[in-house]
Amino acid sequence: MKNIIFVFLLIAQGAAAQHIIHVAKNGNDHNPGTKSRPLQTISAAAKLANPGDIITVHQGIYRERINPPRGGTSNNRRITYQAAPGEKVEIAGSEPVKNWKNAGHNLWKITLPNSFFGTFNPYSDRIHGDWFSDKGRAHHTGAVYLNGKSLNEAAGLQDLSLPEGPVPQWFGMVSDSTTTIWAQFNDADPNTQRVEINVRKTIFYPEKTGINYLTIKGFTLRDAATPWSPPTAEQVGLIGTNWSKGWIIENNTISNSRCAGISLGKYGDEWDNKGESAKGYVGTINRAVEHGWNGDNIGHHIVRNNTISNCEQAGIVGSLGCIFSTITGNYIHDIHSRRLFSGAEMAAIKFHGAIDVTIAHNHISNSNRGIWLDWMAQGSRITANLFHDNDEDIFCEVDHGPFLIDNNILLSRVALYERSEGGAFVHNLVTGMITSSSDDRQTPYFVPHSTIITGLKSIPGGDIRFYNNIFIGKARLNIYDQVKQATPVAGNVYINGAVPAAAEKTPLVLSNFYTNISLQAKPDGFYLYINVDPAWITDQLVTAKLLGNVAGIGLPFENPDGSPVLIDKDYFGQARNATGVSPGPFVLNRKETLQLKVWPVVVQHQ
């Protein structure tokens, strides 16, 4: 009885220790943070918050960088940063600027003292790093925004004398004491409009690593002078976890990051941006292991129900720090859309080391690449996502698997580019091309569900399974007829020019079936229209047994908890029958014309 009372007292003390800290624009940082006497800045609240506390931020625009000094201690003892329910809270890395001078020829100019920027001036901070391509000119982390829309940085001041294009331009010059910015504003008067410029590198990012168990929800986070984030350097996003564990980032609107929006990435050290090669990145991985890269310390993040847009490198990036995470319910669009610079790290989601990562129920559009799993996507799953109007939907690079791509809608020009082995492509709807290649680079594989490296090997080509997909138009699976490793193929439907692989013994080829497929945006979401035939039936429910062990490293297809994979639900979570299985991502009914609301989607859990 005494033990029960003691435990009860501990629980009661823990509950009593939790308190809500309020922040409001009319507050004062000398206040205690109560609702009647709130603090004025989120940063002041961060200094007071302890595990279990909730920071509630009230309506307004907060122009500050939050550097949380501590995190929670467990999932049940988090520190939560939240927008007050029903109130619009913006956190901006920009500052408004007035007193622009007309410089003639539809050009405006402003000169600011360098003290305006404090210790960090984005207009002298040049974007650089491993795998970055500047296209022969300088790029800076600064930006100029007109009514919330970013202008393009010009290559030189002389470019501003040219007629304005569809996107106005700006150019900056920094002297020892001042920063001068010239800009075009498309006939708008910048002194009567909302004009802002970047001043902060990031918005929500801890300087220290190991700041665990934070929740950030309900905010609009915008305008950050983020640096290039390659896998070999510290990855600073507009919001980022900095080598921590157990963050939840949810229900936020994130936009206008100069490089990355959300970072689940690597810590920084003296080797940053000094590893631009396969050998160099292997060195990065080995150092990360010494630096605590394992599931006890790193990853296990949840990124859900955010809208992420207008980031010029990645919507979500993560080298190594993304392990064991779940990315779900996000709308990610217009990533790397301006293309003034280039490199090898651009995608709506770009992960290195996506061990046991689940990417599900996201909507990804109007980006260069949708999802790029680069190196070590062992145990990862890309499931029930909607892709359209990307240059390429999914790229799997030098992964040894097992990895699973299932129940997706892939409507872009290129559906899948794989330079990997050990993958399974199951129950997808595909209208784009599929491409494949081998790779001589030696890349790691692991003890299942861990970061313990077993060995390194190259990618000889093949060992990609294709079961129960619907291919329309451009997919040519005969590219796998000459690969070195066997590629099992069965249960697929090929429509209007799609070509089966020779390995598929009884393919269903429909050369003249009119699918009339289209995706339409309506006020309440996106709808897919497609003609189907309920007679498209296969007898194969896709199981771990059917998928077998991957050839390269001999591992089975498992869920993160070690249980066998079973693809027994469709895009909407509707159960599939054990026999008479419909190909593609939807359980087909008697209707021959489907009208399906595919975003946002309510998933049925049975």
Image (tube, helix red, strand yellow):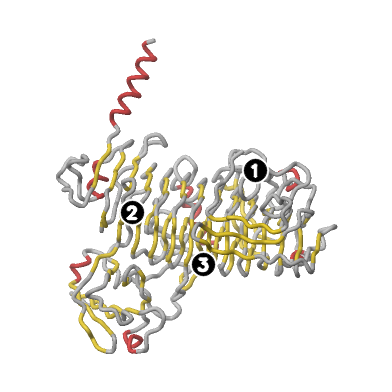
| Quadrant in the rendering for residue 255 | bottom left
Q: Which residue is mark 3?
A: 367
Residue 558 - label? 1
Using residue 304 as the reference point, say whether residue 51 is left or right of it: left
- Which type of secondary structure does the marked residue at label 3 adopt? loop
Residue type at numbered disc 2: Phe
As drawn, 326 above or below 441 = above
For the C terminus, the quadrant is top right
Mark before the other along the chain sequence, 3 or 2: 2
For the N terminus, the quadrant is top left
| Viewer-side label of 3, 2 | 3
Residue type at numbered disc 1: Glu
| Viewer-side label of 1, 3 | 3
Residue type at numbered disc 3: Ser
Question: Residue furthest toward the top?
Answer: 1
Task: For marks 3 and 2, give the CA distance.
Answer: 24 Å
Q: Residue at x 34, y 67 (%)?
A: 148
